[in-house]
Image: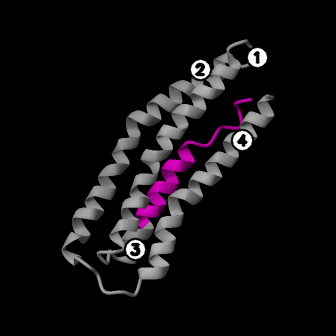
Amino acid sequence: MTRKEVRHRLALAWWRQVAYTLAPLLVLSYLLGDTEPVLPVLQMPLFIAALSSLFLSLPLFSAYKRALVATEAALGRAEEPGAWSELARRRRIAFLAAGLPAWIAALAVFVGLNAVALVLLALGSLVLLYLYRIPRQLG
């Protein structure tokens, strides 16, 4: 597989992850946005849990950056395919942590979390996902 094909597959995986991250929140907000909250007392704990989950991305981002540097160093050498696969593996793991704020926000729809808080959590996940895009300088 050529470098261009690998970059294209990684770009498609990024867009797919954006959809996987935001779809539950959008669907649940659309379907259950006007219903009566189940346990409104859980609004603040869920919001705090979602904000705290942003920090789970810190060690995973460090590992991703190390894999990114290793991939750049391996370009044009025999180790390049292995470096790309390690980068993709690190990124897949980091995607899960980046999606947590939006997924917790989707659960918070049931307890009636404010729309502004839901949007902030979704944007937090999007910003984290944006950090995991493959830079143009690579390849």
The label number, if any, that marks residue 9 in the structure image: 4
Task: Give the Cα separation between the discs numbered 1 and 4.
Answer: 19 Å
Residue 59 against residue 132 in the figure, above or below = above
Task: Give the Cα separation between the discs numbered 3 and 1.
Answer: 47 Å
Nearer the N terminus, badge 4 or badge 2? 4
Task: Give the Cα separation between the discs numbered 1 and 2.
Answer: 12 Å
Is 134 displayed left or right of 51 in the figure? right
| Disc 2 packing (10 Å; few <14; some 14–19; many ≥20) | some
The label number, if any, that marks residue 116 in the structure image: 3
- The picture places residue 17, in percent across and down from the top left corner, at 57, 52
Specify start and end residues of the magenta stretch as a single range: 120-139
**Amino acid at circle 2:** Ala
| Disc 1 packing (10 Å; few <14; some 14–19; many ≥20) | few
**Amino acid at circle 3:** Val
Q: Secondary structure at mark 4?
A: helix
Q: Toward the viewer: 127 or 13? A: 13
Task: Give the Cα separation between the discs numbered 3 and 4.
Answer: 34 Å
Nearer the N terminus, badge 3 or badge 1? 1
Q: Secondary structure at mark 2?
A: helix
Residue that badge 2 annotates = 70
- The picture places residue 90, in percent across and down from the top left corner, at 52, 32
**Amino acid at circle 4:** Arg
Identified at 31% across, 86% down, the residue is: 36
Task: Give the Cα separation between the discs numbered 2 and 3.
Answer: 40 Å
Residue that badge 1 annotates = 76
Is 3 displayed left or right of 36 in the figure? right
